[in-house]
Image: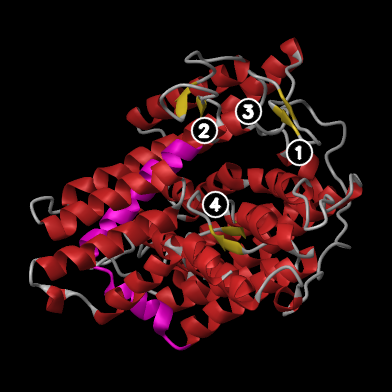
Amino acid sequence: MLDSYFKISERGSSVAQEVRGGLVTFFTMAYIVALNPIILAYSPDANGQFLFGGDAPAPAMVAAATALVAGVMTILMGSVANYPLAIATGLGLNTFVAVGIASQMTWAAAMGLVVLEGLIILVLVLTGFRVAVFKAVPPQIKIAISVGIGLFIALIGLVDAGFVRRTASGPVPVGLGVNGNLVGWPTVVFVFGTLLIIALMVRKVKGAILIGIASATALAIGIQQMFDIKPNFTPGNPPTIVDGGWQLGIPSVPKEVVAVPEFDFTGQFDLFGAFSVDNVSLIAAILLLFTLLLSDFFDTVGTVTAIGHESGLADKDGNVDNIQKILLVDSVAAAAGGAAGISSNTSYIESAAGVGEGARTGLASIVTGIAFLLTTFLAPLVAIIPYEAATPALIIVGFLMMSQIKNISWDDLGIGVPAFLTIILMPFTYNISVGIGAGFITHVVIRLVQGRGKEVHPLMYFVSGLFMIYFLSSPLNAWLG
């Protein structure tokens, strides 16, 4: 029954392979359960007050809601769309919501804007517009998107592990460790995990990524027992930062394994509240909604494209079966995140780690979703997996996705230049949508200059115009007051 419904054999997979892939995806993105409450809880609102006012149980409620929505929506993605793609609160989107939107209005109004954005995207999916845009993108630009995301997630892995950090001073914004030196035992855990996964892959060991994460976590627990290492970042006002500490989560044996979740925080949203805030004009609210919508819209397009290429589920034009269902679930997830009060939920590029482990069907997503649902009760157990143990998977998957670069026609400037900008701007700006937008705009401009404008799909002109508004949103805001 499983094989028939999920097409497991048809896609060259097995149930065991799907279970491994689903677990790897979960372990590489489980950090969001701990990180989302930190971002939301310690971001001041329009009155300068922190969302939870220092109330300890409230972040736990957000963690439980984060895991609950991620679990339900990921299971929906697997069962409805049969695609190895996991969903959770969008990292980056939640920061924009907390810092860029909620700082100007109440949290309920900000969440209403998120729900509205999700509903608009849902309408765009149901009318066929979102799928049409997906199919209008030239195949080789889709490959560039996949490659760029590969570099992006590799950089995420390096930064999250503390291997690469922001520099306090100097000519470059990032550097190796602290002042050019690798600092702390957590970095040793990261290096160990990365080298172990590479060695296991070279030896063609099944479950290499999962074994690497588990082994690195065991090493981290042992190191913590011996040296009692503090976290790198402790939230507060101001926060405490310790060089050489764990990036997120302390891998010590938990005092308790099961915790009863509370969901009192969910459901706090005001659908049109953002449009009645005294210090936010109607135009400003619309631009905030537009920025949120465009980021969510194209982050998902990029993620689905990358997963399709990496898993072999994309055709020669980069299109994916069941794309309508995939985008439908993703749009519902965006609205569900806002309705739950935990920011927009979206497709996670960390799903590529599960694909690297062999996931090819929606069964892997169901495994990931079940793991998230269990996390609502087993949060203390999940918290022992530090960034440094999970992020080696992202480095390996970045390499796997990078291999597609050979399929880009670099001699054609109308493809090569947009592909180059797409690839480098995703990691350099830490934003998938920026890379996609730059690639779209330059592709259109170059084709016009070449006198080949008729080769460009009309939707590419329209979307490129939207991206111009996206890039110019700050001066437009200032001009319109």
**Circle 2 Cα neighbour tier, 10 Å, few/some/many (<14 / 14–19 / ≥20):** many
The residue depicted at 43 percent of the width and 54 percent of the height is: 432
Percent coordinates x, y for residue 413 in the rendering: 12, 55
- Give the labeled residue for mark 3: 217
Q: CA distance from mark 1 to mark 2?
A: 24 Å
Q: Residue at x 76, y 73 (%)?
A: 277
- Quote the CA–CA distance across marks 1 and 4: 18 Å
Q: Which residue is mark 4?
A: 22
Q: Is residue 254 above or below residue 480?
A: above
Of the residues under marks 3 and 2, which one precedes in the sequence?
2
Mark 4 vs mark 2, foreground winner is 2
The number of numbered badges drawn on the structure is 4
Can you tell which of label 3 and label 2 is closer to the viewer? 2
Residue under label 1: 381
Could you tell me which residue is drawn at 75 percent across and 67 percent down? 340
Q: Is residue 134 magenta?
A: yes
Is 369 left, or right, of 46 in this rendering? Answer: left
Q: CA distance from mark 1 to mark 3?
A: 12 Å
Residue 345 occupies which quadrant of the picture?
A: bottom right
* Residue 164 left/right relative to 262: left
Q: Is 46 rendered above or below residue 220?
A: below
What residue is shown with label 2?
159
Q: Estimate how packed mark 3 is, as few (under 14), some (14 to 19) or many (20 or more) residues with alpha carbons within 10 Å.
A: many
User: Is any part of residue 361 visible from this angle?
Assistant: no
